[in-house]
Image: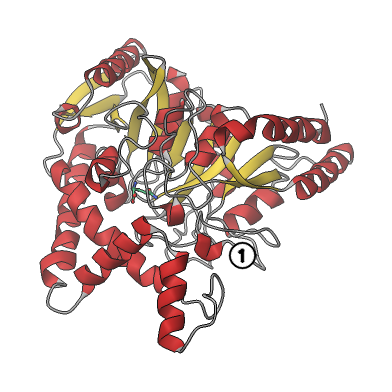
Amino acid sequence: FSSVEITRHLLDRIQQLDGNYNSFITVTEELALAQATAADERLARGEAPPLCGVPIAHKDIFCTSGVRTSCGSKMLDNFVPPYDATVVENFNRAGAVTLGKTNMDEFAMGSSNETSYYGPVKNPWDTDCVPGGSSGGSAAAVAAQLAPGTTATDTGGSIRQPAALTNTTGLKPTYGRVSRWGMIAFASSLDQAGPIARNAEDAAYMLSVMAGHDAKDSTSLNRPLQDYTLNLNDSIAGLKIGVPKEYFGEGLNADTAARVQDALQEFEKLGAELVEVSLPHTGLAVPAYYVIAPAEASANLSRFDGVRYGHRCEDPQDLRDLYMRSRGEGFGDEVQRRILVGTYALSAGYYDAYYNKAQQVRRLIKQDFVQAFDKVDVIMGPTSPSPAFALGAKSADPVAMYLEDIYTIATNLAGLPGMSLPCGLVNNMPVGLQIIGNYLDEARMLNVAHQYQ
Ligand code: GLN
């Protein structure tokens, strides 16, 4: 098949099926067909960049030159960036075809994709259920076979949790492995981009294109590029898998636990050894995250003031009215809640009690992992405490929603890579197995996942 044929096929599927899922905010038909035509011409000339002609879609948090980039918010409903994010540029250079921009929780804040200005995403496995979030559109598009792979971002679980809930494979790299340039910032010390795909092999091809040093991102790691596809077939005999006892306690759905245990047994059959480890500060990860992430968000989102770009209210009376109404109208409830919490935590008099304390807890959480990785090669457990829940079931209770990320957030606080892969069904709904790797050990994680798949 030519890239044009494959691209047309997927554009048709999106047109016919995405009304059921709402996984796309923007479909870039013209751009996709132009890129596919160019890719076919390059292939005919004998050029073969790594993803030449492969259609993908980008989470609507990545700036795309000439294509509206909304971040799921009314605030940016009219924002058309004049440049591409580094991640987008990397895919373009690799010959990939952009099908469109995927739906997401507003400013990536959420675990269910219900906070999007463009309406919720539905889980293709059961359209009465959420797909997870905030990269719910990226996960649903892959699950519904509207795109073979998508880009996504993960600040506290937003790649891994939606991957778990939709039976897809998602990988959050080590902090700094993928450039954040042109990716709209939520919590800059936690945000990291990665792929969602059908399996680890496809994710490895995508990560090989995404990863690498970028002088435009000061937190980008200056390490050589890696080809993550090279060691997928290595044996994992002798691999030491740490199983944290804190990840199997209260709050974990019993059937989910059983699927994860089944997967661990499969790894034993492949020659791996299970080792119990302890991550004693696990219970502090969610509270520390919900101080640090909103604090950083409150600073990052101060740029949306109705002056430079984004939503501006009608007929402002004066500058203060312009700021207040533009922000009040442009941001949804969850975003406003985070800005308020973050501003409070950073204010004089509360900074030490909340923000500083949370940073100290963050260090303890990192130490837990450093100690565990002295003994084991990877850590495994559930990605999410239960399978996908019904739309609306948790939207009135922010704390219940925040607990969705109880197993994923610590990884972001520590800057470690993590991935989720399908490990079975509970009542016909997918369950995800989480693999946490040591710093920059993405190649090993993908190898381990591929051996299981
Ligand atoms: N669900 C978490 C939050 O709402 C994580 C989101 C994310 O990883 N972007 O903040």
Q: Nearer the viewer, residue 309 or 181?
A: 309
> Residue 345, image x and y in percent?
20, 68
Kind of residue at badge 1: Asn
In percent of width and height, residue 242 lies at 23, 29
**Residue with the most extreme top position:** 269
For the residue carrying disc 1, how many other residues have a C-alpha within 10 Å: few (<14), some (14-19), or many (20+)? Answer: some
Count of numbered circles in the view = 1
Q: Pick the residue in front: 92 or 43.
A: 92
The residue lying at 59 percent from left, 36 percent from top is 149
Residue at x-position 13% and y-position 34%: 278
Q: Quadrant of the N terminus?
A: top right
Residue 197 vertical position relative to residue 181 in the rendered view, above or below: above
Provide residue 383's location: percent of width, then percent of height.
32, 32
The image quarter in which residue 269 lies: top left
Image height of 347 relative to 452, above or below: below
> In the image, what residue occupies the spot 51% across and 56% down?
71
Indicate how the structure is coloured in the image: secondary structure
Q: Left of 104 or right of it: where is 285?
A: left
Asked whether residue 141 is in view, the answer is: yes
Let me know if residue 181 appears in the view: no
What residue would you read off at disc 1? Answer: 78
Q: Position of residue 381 (x, y in %)?
A: 27, 28
Q: Note whether 237 is above or below 182 in the view shown.
A: above
Is disc 1 placed on a helix, strand or loop?
Answer: loop
Quadrant for residue 373, please give it. Answer: top left
Which picture quadrant has residue 207? top right
